[in-house]
Amino acid sequence: MATLEQLGTVVETDLLVVGFGISGLAAAITAKEENAGLKVLAVDKGCVGYAGKANKGGGHVAFIPEGAEELYVEYHTKNCGDYLNDQDLIRKYASHTVKTMDRWASWGVNFIGREHAGQAHAVIPWKVCIVDNDLMIPMAKTARKLGVEFCEKITITDLLKEGDKVVGAFGFSLLTGETYIFKAKAVVLACGDQNFRIMRMWNSGRGDGIAAAYRAGAKMRNAEFGSFMNIMSAEHKLVAYGAEDALVNAKGENCSERADLDPSLKSVVGGVDLGGSQSVLMYLEVRDGKGPIFEDSSKNGFPTSFVGRNLCNLTGPPDPPFRRPCSEKFWARIMEKKHAGYRNDGPMKEVIPGVVGEFSPLYVDHDYATSVTGLFASGDICGCGGGWAGAVPTPPGRNRGSGLMHAVMTAIFAATSAAKFVAATPALGKVDADQVAKLKEETYAPLKRMKMGTTTHEIVREIGEIMQPVGYSGYKSADRMQEALDRVLVLKAKLANLVALDPHDLSSANECRSMVLCAEMFYRTSMERKESRGWHMREDFKTRDDKNGANWIVVQDKGGEMSLTLDPLPMDRYKYKPE
Amino acid sequence: MNVIKVDDEKCVGCKTCYKACWLDVIRWNEETKRPVIAYAEDCVECNFCEISCPTDAIFVNVDYTRQFPSPYIPRVN
């Protein structure tokens, strides 16, 4: 039998952080601040200061001012979470946004406009300020100064266990293919959610961490809500900000509203909170032969609004208090290429819904521990699984600015818990060489197959065809979901024949395995929820079922089968109940 | 697919484009001290390599014609 050292490079640490996008960086920093004596190592497929997707967004940071917390909890529960949210945890969230910003600022991040933050919501005092898009550079410097160590260009594919406890992780180098065996007293998964590689700017979330946790026996929940959609240009494939209020069908009719849409869908998925019903509206128009759908860009007020002007910089430099050198360069370049991608100069631009996904079902408790001992999680990976957002995709409620806040706040929670766990764990666990040898054989198998098998690009293309159509993932019905699930299961069978040409492609092969698993979980849980609630919209069950629907659907691997169970919400002790 | 062009004359070998690419599209040649566009098919035109380059030596030409999945009605093969 081979020893661990014969199987790969063995690296020992106290705490392993998987992923060093913004949440992983925040977790690593927090762990060192909580306990400077801990050895903290962070691993990612990317490079320090640039990994993940936080630096490719609008840089919005949303917070709830002191004194307004309960108003937010009530509003979110009724209008976004649709009574499926953990009301205790959302209260914890609401009371930590300001504290999070204070700690985050001490890591070198500058909040622009915090003192005079804009009102980001029509009803609740949801405030938004901004950060520059290079915010992870000062955070990385802080981490290094505190002694955090980094391993770049390594993908983690599985977790290593001793009995029921996580004792490390298995991965390989994208550059050389070399195997890495990490031994750790605790692991924080901060490696993002699942975006199914459809919308290109949300491309880094490929679900590897979700799949690794699932295979390690971790619980998942709220998997049926992971099909967030944005509206994008059919011509340049980038987000068409503000298009939802200026939609026109092929007959020239305004279709930003539709009278025959079920009232429950209108009230639950209204534009101001979630902006989700538009994809259903667009789908119904097209199904009725009134497509394609256009954005009348002359009627889109977003680019010149406060948000468009100062936060996304869509129409030139923002007002002086909101200047951000990196963001302005980033958005200007995006806009230049966007305009170059239009086929003509007219105001009517064809738009389509684009699946961002934000599938994020990894279950965590109120301390951001998963159901597996020694395994913690933060950021997008557990956005839905955390349960506090309820019936909506991560980040909570899709309110602008909640993504960065959620990433950093949950990192502080998870790393604080993990640091305590490590301090109470006297020694590294035993990593089983047999488990590693088996993982190595399975993981590297695509490299050894003949080139006649299924390619990663074929899987990615088919996953897109299964997860993107609104008829499958946006406006659901039992028949269509069964058809989609059948297609997922065909792909699942093809994974046994997957080929990879080199370590980069081998990483894609692992991501394909993760995408297929996540798609299966999405459709199985979506079929189980026989009602419409929040982002989960069903044509065959159009209303919320408070009698039978007040359960979290929990998914877990049981002997190789995907097991679904119902976990009733403790509605009796929750303050806000359905009327 | 996107075409990523590097101007070797303008490039100063700082490696920032390699670091900035989150999707492993850009690799680095340690001998020539220049980027290698290894996996252009995975580029998502975030342009972070471009905006991070101190000498404007790298440019992403976007392919606007690439295939997108069927947006509304499932396309059955």
Image (spheres, coloured by chain):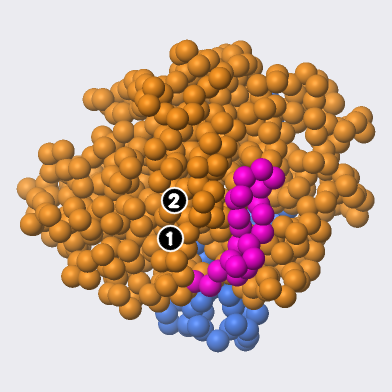
Chain colours: A orange, B blue
- Does A417 appear above or below A42? above
* Mark 2 crowdedness (10 Å alpha carbons): few <14, some 14-19, many ≥20: many
x, y percent for residue B60: 66, 66
Question: As drawn, is A101 to the left or to the right of A229?
Answer: left
Residue under the point 43% across and 82% down: B31
Residue hosting label 2: A95
In which image quadrant can residue A423 be found?
bottom left
- Does B49 appear above or below A561? below
x, y percent for residue A144: 34, 75
**Pointers 1 and 2 within a single chain:** yes
Q: Mark 2 belongs to which subunit?
A: A
Q: Nearer the viewer, residue A87 or A512?
A: A87
Q: Nearer the viewer, residue A512 or A481?
A: A481
Quick check: can you spot residue A571? yes
Measure the alpha-carbon separation of dots 1 and 2: 8 Å
- Does A410 appear above or below A271? below
Instruction: Tell me whether circle 1 and circle 2 mark residues in contact (CB < 8 Å).
Output: yes
Residue under the point 56% across and 19% down: A579
The amino acid beneath tag 1 is Lys
The amino acid beneath tag 2 is Ser
Q: Mark 1 belongs to which subunit?
A: A
Magenta range is A109-129
Q: Nearer the viewer, residue A509 or B50?
A: B50
x, y percent for residue B14: 50, 83
Residue hosting label 1: A99
